[in-house]
Image (spheres, rainbow, N blue to C red):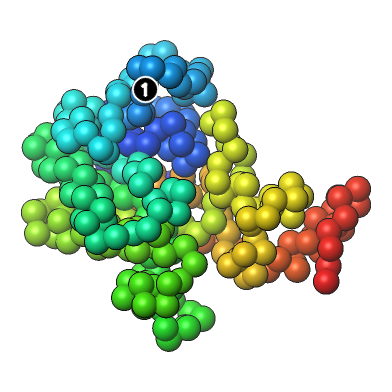
Amino acid sequence: MEGGSRMKRGTVCVTGGAGYIGSWLIMRLLERGYTVRATVRLDPERKRDISHLTNLPGASERLQIFNADLEKRHSFNEAIKGCVGVFHVAYPADFVDGNEADDATVKTVIARNLDILKACLKSKTVKRVVYTSTAAAVFVNKSGLKEMDENSWSDVEFCRDMRIHGSSYIIPKTLIEQATLKFGEDNGLDVVSIIPPLVVGPFTCPHLPGSISVSLAMILGTKYGLGRGFEETLMVHIDDVVSGHIFLFECPEAKGRYICSSAETSVYELATLISTRYPDIQMPLE
């Protein structure tokens, strides 16, 4: 992160600010001296606890909360106006619970995301957008390649035809990232995407993040977890992911896609590690 030319500190927008990655990113941006505008979905009928944001060091002076929802067109415009950069972390709730990724819904979700990019263009001030993608947009295809890079894309048609587990997440995220990068190229908007696998580590948000629930499945005894589709998996620490976001925003030379991953492991290796370091927690090793 040190050395080289940097974009001048200024005001940036973080969409999906109340979530796991978004809230940790806001914390680190405030520490680095940025003024942050966080977008959060606020329900007037049910008060949402955002104290994990408002209580952050520097929040009282340099954090603004904006009510914005991907389902409401143009709701991000005010938060983005005047910003020098946007960290687009938000993901619509349509597919979070495994809802089927039908074509009409996917097209709607892509259009919602493009509305955010259009707001960036309209602002005339946004210098770069960092889009949070996922490794799920990279590694799912019929070739079964073990080694992949930023040129690799998940095969959407293969996911549909084979009814791949998790396709309701894989398909939209793949198509959204492709549409996001294409919009940037077609409209002269500087867009960079960061691609993390399973994100683990501490969190500030009041709820247990989904990726943490998956990674702790063996300890918590939950059925859904590393044993289902995660016999072997890639992981990355939340601090590394957030540092990657900030680096890609500040580095003038950054272009295109960047995988942000650190460790490849298996259920067996994790169980062995946990049992060795924490003898009171015995994991089944067979």
Residue with the mark numbered 1: 43
Q: Name the residue rendered at 38%, 43% in the picture.
A: 93
Mark 1, secondary structure of its residue: loop
Residue 106 left/right relative to 205: left
- Which residue reaches farthest right? 279
Q: Could you say which is closer to the camera, residue 160 or residue 25? A: 160
Q: Could you say which is closer to the camera, residue 212 or residue 165? A: 165
Residue 160 left/right relative to 269: left
Q: Which amino acid lies under the numbered mark 1 shown in the image of this protein?
A: Asp
Q: Could you say which is closer to the camera, residue 127 or residue 52? A: 52
Is 30 placed above or below 137 here?
above
Query: Which quadrant is the C terminus positioned in?
Result: bottom right
Q: Residue 129: image x %, image y %?
A: 25, 46
Q: Residue 268: image x %, image y %?
A: 75, 68
Whether residue 152 is visible, yes or no, is no
Q: Name the residue rendered at 40%, 33% in the picture.
A: 17
